[in-house]
Amino acid sequence: MADNPNDLTEYKGMSRRTFMKNTGLVAGGVVGGGLLGGLLTNQMQQKPEVQSTTESGQIQDARVFFSRGQDFAILSAATERIFPKDDIGPGAIELGIPYFIDKQLSTEWGINAKEYMKGPFAVYTTNTGNHNVTKNQDKQGPNAETQVPAPTPRYQSKMTRSEIFVTGLREMDNVAQQEFGESFVKLTGEQQDDVLRMFEEGKVELKGIGSKNFFNLLLQTTIEGAYADPVYGGNKNMMGWKMKEYPGPRASYMAQIEVDEFVKLEPQSLRNYQGH
Amino acid sequence: MVTKLEKVDVVVVGTGWAGGVIAAELSKAGYKVVALERGKNQTRDDYIGVKDELRYTNRYEMMQNLSSETITSRNNLDEVALPVRTRKEMMAGNDLGGGSVHWAGASYRWTPYDYEIRSKTIERYGEAKIPEGMTIQDWGITYDEMEKYYDRWEKTAGISGEPDPLGPNRSSDYPNPPMKESPPIKLFKEATKKLGYHPYQVAAGNLSQSYTNPDGEAMNACMYCSYCTQYGCDFGAKSDPLVTVLPTAMKTGNFEARVGANVRRVLYENGKATGVLYVNTLTGEEYEQPADVVVLAAFTFTNNRLLLLSGIGEPYDPKTRKGVIGRNYNGQFNITFLGARGFFNEKKFNYYAGAGALGGVIGDFAADNFDHTNVDFINGGGIEMRQYGSGAIATNKVPSGTPGWGAEFKKNSIHYTNRSLVVWYTSANMSWWHNYLSLDPTYKDDNGDPLLRATLKYTDQDRNIAKFGIGKCREIMEAMGADIVDEDEVPEEFDHIYDGGHYAGGVIMGADPKTSAVNNYLQMWDAENIFVVGASAFPQFAGHHPTETVGALAYRAAEGIEKYLKNGGLLVTRKEVGSHV
C-alpha cells in the first residue's frame, strides 16, 4: 500500500492501461502518448457511466466536485451496495445519491468551513483517525430520534470531508485490486460488499482518518441522499419519500396528529412548500 | 485601538432565555440595557419556508460556527484534551435568541429535593448514601422561594401543560391547556397507568392555543408541523425570546440588542466590573462597553470561559479541590437519555407529525419520588415518550441484528419507519470533584485566547442510574405492546459528543462562598456588580430538562439586579457552612 493515498504514481486502481481498457478505446497501435489528451477529452463527452433513469432533474446530473470520473464511478457502485435497488423501490444510483454526495462535498460542510480545524492534530490518529470510542447514534443518546444511524467519529483529522472522500474511494479501489485483482467497479456485488466491510470494520489502514470513519461518512451521506429534500440532488422525484410514505415539509399536521389510522399523504418538497 | 462607548446601566452578554428575561425586566424598570450577541440578527422571517431536515438537523444550520472557537474535552485529569471539532459533536446555540430559538420546548419545574439535595439525602438515607468525591450541594434557595419565578416564566412563555400528579406545589395552573394527545402518547399513558404509574402530558413551550402573555406579546397555536427541535418556528407558535422577552425589551425604548458582538473580557478593577471588551465579528474592531452592572447570560461554556479569561473569581483546582470557577461541571450527556425502543408489527403511527415537546411523561422514578434505600445511586429522572415529528433521514431505526446497510437494512428501515417508538429515562447527572471546566493549555480561538477545556468522566452512579432507567423503559415498552423491544447500551465512558445543548455548572450558586461562585440572586460573591445567569449556576443537574429553571433563575436574578442598582452591596450575607469537598 502506498504511504500517501494521494500519490498518483502509485494509483493502481486506475493505471493508464486499465484506463484504456475500461474506456474501450484501446485499438492496436493507435494509442500514443500524444493522443492521450485528446482521447480523454473525447471520453468526457461520452455517455456518463451513471445515468438517471428519470426524466426530470437531469440538469443536476453533472459532477461539480469529483474531477475524475473513476472516483465517481467507485462512489456510485459503493452507494448502490449500501442502498440497493430492489422490489421496494429504487437504489442509490436511481435516486441520484452519488450526485447528492458530489454536491455536498463542495458545500461548506464538505470543506469543513464551520468546523474547528486548527492544530495541533493528535499524531496517534495517523492510522485510525479515531482513537476513541464512537457513538452509535442508533443505540443511544439524546438525538437518537433525529440522527442518521451512522456512528459519529471523534473527528481529529486535518483532512476535510471532501479530502476524506477522494482518499477513501481511491483506497477502496486499491484494496479491490489487491484482494480481487480488479477495479472496485468491476467486482461482483458480493466482492464489493467484502471491500466495504473491510472499511466498515477498520481493517484497512487509511492515513489521517481511518477506514472506519470514511465508511461511516459514506454510509451517512448515502442515507441522507436517499431522504433529503430533492433540492439537493438526491431523493430523485421524491422516490425515497414515497418508499417511506413520508409527506415532506408541510405547514400543518393538525388534521393528522390525533388520528389513529396511518394517513398517507402524497409527498411535497420544499419547492411546493415555498410556493413555486 | 479600542473604542470606548457611552456607559449604560446594564450590559448583558447573550440574548437567550437568560439574557432576554434580564433585558426585558430591567428595561421595563427604566434602566438602559445593551445586550451583546455574537451571532447574527435573526427574526421569524428567517425561518419561513425553510423546513429542511438536511440543512437544520443534519448540517446544524442554527448552531455555532466552530471554525473560530470550540471547547476541548477529556475524561481524566492526566489526559491531553482534544478539540471538539465538528458541529455534530458540539451543539451550541447562536444568533439572536441563542439556543432558546432551536429548543424543543419541554418545560419542567425542578423539585424541592433538587434544591436541597444534600440535606434531604442525608436526612432520609444518612450521610453514607453520598459517595466519597460526589460534590452535590444545596442551592442556597428552596423550591418554595423559587415557585413565584417559575410561575412568572410559565406565564411569559405561555407554557401549555397539566400539573405533574407527583409534582411540587403550584400557586397557579399553567397558562394554557396541554397539547393534543397523539395515539403513541395515548398508548404510553395507558401502559404506564396500567403499571400503576402517574402519566401526564409534557408541559410545552409549543403553544396549544393562541395566547397573549402578561407583557402583551402574542403567540400562535402550534400546527404540529414537526420542524421544531433544531429549527426556529416559522409560525410564532414556539415560545422563544424572539417572540416574547426581546420584543418586550425593544418596546421600552431602553434596550439595544447589538449583534455580531463577541465579548472577549469582562473589565475588572478594585473588586468591581467596569464593563466588557468586545470585538465586532464583521470588522474586527474592538469596543469597550462600560456599565454599572455586567450580566453574563451566555451559554454555560461561555460564562465560565469569560470569567477564567478575565481572571475573576478563584479558578477551581481539582488537586486541592479549592476554588470555585469551573467547579461542579455537570449536564445531560449521552448517558442521560437511554431507554428502550419498541417495534410494532401491526401498528403504524403518523410519526411524521409532531412537535418538540409533544409527549407523555411519568415522574414516578424522578428525584426522590421512590425509595433509594436498595438502589446503588441517588436521584432519578423522568420517563418520557416524545413525538418530535421525525424527518425522513432520521427515521431509519431497525431491530438489533439487522445489518447497518445493504438490502436487509433498506427493507427493515423502510418497514419500521412509522412503526417504532422510543421511551427514555432522563436520568439526573451528579457533580464530582473530578468533573470541572478550565482553560486549555494548547488550543486557541481566532483572537488567540485559550479555549475552554471540559474534563468529565462517568462514575458508577451514572452507569447504575442509566441501567435502572433502561429496565423501567423496557417494562413500559412491553406494556405498550411492542413486538420487539431493544434496549439502549450503557456506555462505559463519556464520548466527548456534546449534543442536546444541556451543559451546566462551573459558576454555581450556593450559600457558602467557599463552594459557590454566585449567591441565590446569581450575584458573584467576589464582584458584587457581576451577575452570572443561566445553567452555569446549577450545582448539579436534576432528572428533568433545564430550560424552565434557567428562565425562573433569570427572573430571580433580574429582581436582584434591580435591588443592587437601587441599593448596591452584596444582596446575601456570606455564610460559611463548611465545605463538602
Image (tube, coloured by chain):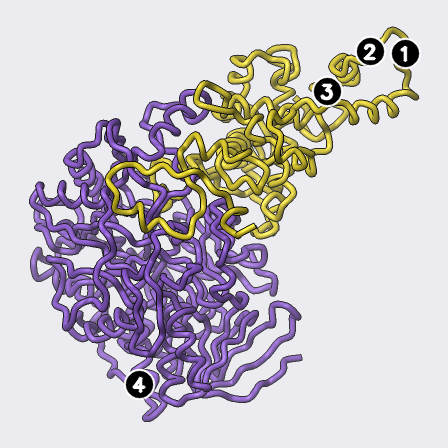
Chain colours: A yellow, B purple
For residue A153, above or below residue A77: below
Identify the residue under disc 3: A14
The CA distance from mark 2 to mark 1 is: 7 Å
Query: As shown in the figure, which amino acid type bears the numbered disc 4?
Result: Leu
SS for tag 4?
loop
Q: What residue occupies the far right of the structure in this picture?
A: A34
SS for tag 1?
loop
Query: As shown in the figure, which amino acid type bears the numbered disc 1?
Result: Val
SS for tag 3?
helix
The CA distance from mark 1 to mark 3 is: 20 Å
Crowd band around label 3 with a 10 angstrom C-alpha radius: few (<14), some (14–19), many (20+): some
Place of residue B273 in the rendered image (x, y in percent of width and height, measured from the top left): 45, 82
Q: Chain of mark 2?
A: A
Identify the residue under disc 1: A30
Place of residue B466 in the rendered image (x, y in percent of width and height, measured from the top left): 24, 43
Q: Are marks 2 and 1 in contact (CB under 8 Å)?
A: yes
Q: Are marks 3 and 4 on the same chain?
A: no
Q: Is residue A42 left or right of residue A157?
A: right
Identify the residue under disc 4: B570
For residue A253, above or below residue B279: above
Query: As shown in the figure, which amino acid type bears the numbered disc 2?
Result: Val
Q: Chain of mark 3?
A: A
Badge number at residue A21 = none
**B537 and B454: which one is in front?**
B537
Badge number at residue A26 = 2
Query: As shown in the figure, which amino acid type bears the numbered disc 3?
Result: Met
Residue B133 visible to the viewer? no
